[in-house]
Image: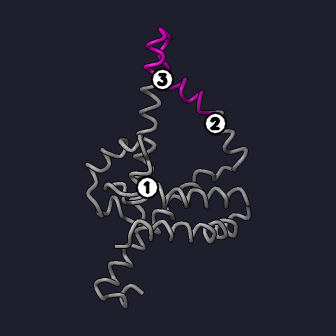
Amino acid sequence: MPSGKVHDAITLGLALPTFGAGYLATGSLAASLICGVAFIFGGLMFGPDLDTVSRPYSRWGPVRAIWLPYRYFFPHRSRFSHGLFFGALIRVIYFLGVVTLICLVSAYLYQTLNGGRLPGVGDIVQIWNPVGQSLREYFGSTFLIIVFVGLWAGAASHTITDLAGSFIKTGRSGKFF
């Protein structure tokens, strides 16, 4: 398998072509920039190797503990961690679930400690509505799709590089190309 340095170099080397492809697909400078940044984040921070002690895992610093349950449930190089489509999708869903859980627990603790009323689901939706409206206003209605495509492509570059490395090392490179 390629080293972490190789994966990082490939991610950074493909960032500009991803930006260009985003611009060709959308015609929007903002959308292509978002896609390119999501690609870099997906390749450097959100890659398939979060299921091991790796460069992406270490880059999360003090908050890397959020990935411990992920590492426990998904064995390294399984279709759920390194799968081309489902790997990135599962990491996005997992990450959003963890962030949501942390936000909810924080809100409940804050309100409990300050003697306030605990927020209900309607309160949380009301808080997030302006955020969603601002994102749609500034980045368009396809913002989340563009971010996911960038994250997916960044993580996919890692998986494809691993596949190519395996085929080359086993002498089956002719079957890969």
Q: Please give the name of the residue rendered at 30% of the width and 64% of the height, measured from the top-left corner.
A: 77
The residues bearing labels 2 and 1 have C-alpha atoms spaced at a distance of 22 Å
Residue at image location 42% in from the left, 56% down from the top: 56
Nearer to the camera, 148 or 43? 43
Q: Which kind of residue does numbered mark 1 sit on?
A: Leu
- Image quadrant assignment for residue 167: bottom left
Select label 2 or label 3 by which is in front.
3
What percent of the width, then of the height, locates residue 44?
48, 59
Q: Does the magenta segment cover residue 135?
A: no
Q: Is residue 65 above or below residue 75?
A: above
Residue identified by numbered label 2: 131
In which quadrant of the rendered view does residue 2 lie?
Answer: bottom left
Say which element carries label 2: helix
Secondary structure mostly seen in the magenta stretch: helix
Q: Which residue is mark 1?
A: 89
According to the picture, the residue beneath numbered tag 3 turns out to be: 107
Alpha-carbon span between mark 2 and mark 3 = 17 Å
Q: Is residue 112 magenta?
A: yes
Residue 106 % position (x, y) = 45, 25
SS for dot 3: helix
Is 88 located above or below residue 119 in the figure? below
- Depth check, front residue: 144 or 44: 44
Q: Specify the amino acid type for callout 2.
A: Val
| Circle 1: element type | helix
Closest to the observer: 2 or 132? 2
Q: Residue furthest bottom?
A: 174
Quadrant for the N terminus, please. Answer: bottom left
Numbered range of the magenta stretch: 108-129
Q: Would residue 61 be found to the left or right of residue 130 on screen?
A: left
Residue 136 against residue 110 in the figure, above or below? below
